Image (cartoon, coloured by chain):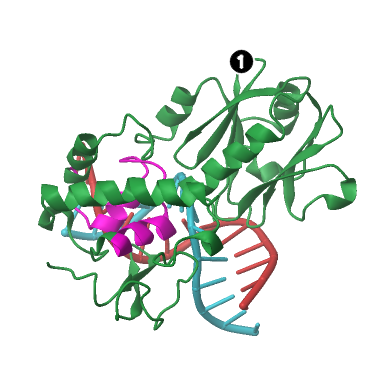
Chain colours: A green, B cyan, C red
Amino acid sequence: MPELPDVETFRRYLNRTAKNKRIDNVVVATTSLVKDTSKASLKRQLKGHRITKTKRHGKYLLGRLSSDTWLVLHFGMTGDLQYYKSEEDEPDYTALRLDLANNYHLAYTSRRKLGEVRIVSSPDELAEEKELGPDVYSKQFSKRMFIDTVRRSRGVIKTTLMNQSMMSGLGNVYADEVLFQVGVHPSTPVKKLDDGDLGKIYNTIRRVLRTTITHKADPDDFPRTYFTGKRESNRACPRCSGTIRKAQISGRPTYYCSRHQKKNK
DNA sequence: TTCCATGTTCCGCA
DNA sequence: TTGCGGAACATGGA
């Protein structure tokens, strides 16, 4: 679930729920997800403070604390956020729980324990440490930057779009969605794409992200011509009379339409 | 039971 | 030397 549109949805959720509420108590249930700091230190840095502002860089959600440091949440493949009042509503797999002054709780859950929780001094510090490229949905990330960045890659287009150090935010599912919509085969070498092709890919990335964020990253609400949420081989293509195929690209399961996504135009 | 999975990181090879 | 691709990681669900 958690690629850029999901994390942006989490960010907005946090803004209208736990933001500006004092954190009275902190429960760390899954210590292995806390990186670069001890459990005790994480608790100390959260307790008594509030999240006053949120940001997102790619798939990372950051919350500025009233102490002027930043809480970082990464959701791995199965992370989620839940805001609730009654203790019996506590979700399964809660890894970190913030008990707020209004008696509500914010739970960060992780089924597969692949995420990350930490404190950094600034969003820039996080980007530097993780070597994150610009957020693919940010205003600053222009079409020119996109084309120049992609040109540095010697690999195939899908893998390039997913490379977080080139641009951050797209994962396996949304990279497929973008290429599906723009009609480019995922294993097309970047060097075979001209500036016109790349410009179209850029426009499609922005449009797909805008649309899916609008629908709160819920595939059930996506337009019919999207195939996120319907990733299944041998299924009819929602855009043409073709059939959805599955392949392995850079070790990731990849879905594409064998008819309207040709390797060479 | 076996296989698969929306994440990142590490290692070997070209 | 640099960058790409595959494997590993942890764990639940189909």
Q: Could you say which is closer to the camera, residue A21 or residue A32?
A: A21
Q: Could you say which is closer to the camera, residue A122 or residue A263?
A: A263
Q: Is residue A93 above or below residue A261?
A: above
Q: Could you say which is closer to the camera, residue A194 or residue C8?
A: A194
State the image quarter where residue A226 is shown: bottom left
Is residue A163 at least partly visible in the picture?
no
Kindly identify the residue that appears in the image at 39 percent across and 83 percent down.
A234
User: Label 1 is placed on what type of residue?
Assistant: Asp
Q: Is residue A121 above or below residue A147?
A: above
Q: Within 10 angstroms of label 1, few (less than 14), some, or many (20 or more) residues?
A: some
Name the residue that disc number 1 marks: A68
**Is residue A167 rendered magenta in the image?**
yes
Report the span colored magenta.
A152-181
Residue A76: x and y in percent read 55, 50
Q: Could you say which is closer to the camera, residue A143 or residue A64?
A: A143
Q: Element at badge 1?
A: loop
Is residue A157 at least partly visible in the picture?
yes
Q: Is residue B10 above or below residue A11?
A: below
Q: Circle 1 marks a residue in which chain?
A: A
Kindly identify the residue that appears in the image at 49 percent across and 47 percent down.
A213
Residue A14: x and y in percent read 65, 36
